[in-house]
Image (tube, rainbow, N blue to C red):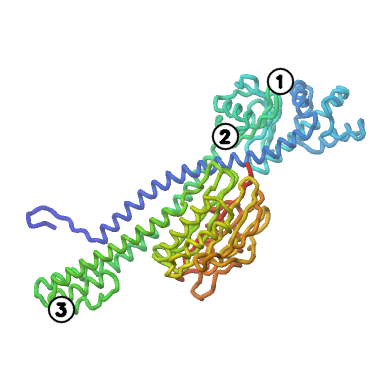
Amino acid sequence: MFSKNGKCKVNITVFGEIAIIFIIGTILISILSGIAFFSNSRANILSQKLKQTDDILDDFVPYLERYKSFYYLCEYMLDNADTLDIEYDKNEKTNEKHKELVDRHPGMVLTEVTEEEFKELSPEDQRLFAEVVYNRFQMRANDIIRAYDVSYIYLAIANDNYDNAVFIFSGSDGKAPRGNKYGDAYIIGTPATINEDQKQALLDAKNDEYKLANSTGFIDRYEFLDKIKNGELFAGISLTYSDVRQEIIESAIRGTGSVITFMIFFSIICLVFVHFWISNPIREVQKSVEAYEENKDSAEIERRLSGFDMVNEFGALSRSFTQMAKAIDEYIDEVQTITKEKERIGAELSVASRIQEDMLPRIFPPFPERKEFDVYASMKPAKEVGGDFYDFFLIDDEHIALVMADVSGKGVPAALFMVIAKTLIKTRALAGGTPSQILYDVNNQLTEGNDADFFVTVWLAILNIRTGKGLASNAGHEHPIIRRSGGEFAPVIYKHSMPIGMLENIKFEEHEFEMSKGDTLFVYTDGVAEATNVSKELFGIERTTDALNKCKVNEPKDIINTVINEIKDFVGSAEQFDDITMLTFCYRGDN
């Protein structure tokens, strides 16, 4: 269409503009998600592969070293490679040779034969002994390859300069025969050149620092065993690079595909909503305004807009235009005043919400340098601000305080009281004392001038990080739930003290507890157990415990996310009526 000055002017609807924004946003988010997922997938999968190879070598190396003459046998096998009958992979033949050897030496246990005892054997028996052990090593390596789907597992000796290596044996998956140089599996004596990345990985392995090294078409992981006559002995595992890269790409594609699907679905829902609840009302209001400009008939405006008597801004806009002819100026002033007030209140609540969130620890892991424990917590208020709070902080290098509390009431008053209570508890705890002493002093401070009759249920514990021993005091709060290492979560039931803030000079009970390596503690507010579905059923302590036991990993964030998801599934469309706050503490032990 052309404007009054003759220039071409393209009209586009609000719906069209929003649709364009959604399309551009979806494309950008998809691209960024793809990059992020690829990076994360690469890091995660390489970390998984390193952990997998660690586990394999933790099984394989002890199997080799249980032979007391293992290191000398490696030297012997390499020195006598040309005379050994080892070009087979059959258990029957190995067993026959083993039987022949035992017949000659009754009571001989291969794993118990020392280097000195081996040297005392005749040359024929030495050769027979080495052939049996070599092929058992070989079959063990083959079993690992088939079980764990790795490309190679082998034993090799590197020279002092780490630029060349000689293989003692290499496993085979049985799909191709072991054989010649640089074949599918390297036989004893096969030489190999070591690149710089592999050399660095070997040096790191010697210092107990492990990483994956890149070689042509493979990713290698090494384990230093010992220095022997021929050089330095290493065990190694190789993974096919193309397979690992394919896993990374597939993982990134799955993640990116999920994001794209969600964005498309979300965009469609939003655009449908925009069409019916924004575009149509706007179009009708526009026509009504144009009609009023022509005939100044307020009754016509009222008739046209009577079907849009909605509770949102469009309803208010319709009513405003209906009365525009009578008191347009006065009404506009009133609307502006109301709008400003709503914005002010909304802005203040938003600031209050951010302040409350900022008061709670939100950076996880909070103490990355401390490997003895891990902690994660979350709070979801029922309103813009809430009365629940959690806290954890180091009192000194050996003691950590854990706090879970719930202020009576909700909204802004409860949030203000929560700020006071949280500050008093932390300040008093840092000054020293047991949990009962801390709660005693904080209770007296809160009781003084508490005309609003607020009170706080508190669970407070102080744990010795080095020993795992601690003291806990429960002022009317929910029972903690603990999973002992290797077991399942179960509530710990004991007598409570009164909440703080009710009466002065209350003595609070406390009890000793102890956490062992691998134990996990879960504390929460009543918003968890009292989460209610549309049938008015409570989530309850039993469902909470069952939800915790569904998470088999000992990671605090995963445990809390599992409970959150279970609550969401249980509650469904029911409205949240109380704050939901949780904290999980995993004790790793004194490192």
Residue 343: image tag: none
Question: Of 90 and 533, which appears nearest the observer?
Answer: 533
Q: Position of residue 302 (x, y in %)?
A: 18, 78
Q: Residue furthest left?
A: 5
Residue type, mark 2 in image: Leu
Badge 3 crowding class, 10 Å Cα cut-off, few under 14, some 14 to 19, many 20 or more, is some
- In the picture, measured across the screen, residue 75 lies left or right of residue 280, that is right
Badge 2 crowding class, 10 Å Cα cut-off, few under 14, some 14 to 19, many 20 or more, is many
Question: Of 462 and 311, which appears nearest the observer?
Answer: 462
For mark 1, give the secondary structure: loop
Q: In the displayed structure, would residue 441 be above or below residue 572?
A: above
| Residue labelled with disc 2 | 212
Residue type, mark 3 in image: Glu
Q: Residue at x 39, y 65 (%)?
A: 412
| Residue labelled with disc 1 | 230
| Residue labelled with disc 3 | 300
Disc with the residue nearer the chain's start (2 vs 1): 2
Q: Position of residue 68 (x, y in %)?
A: 80, 31
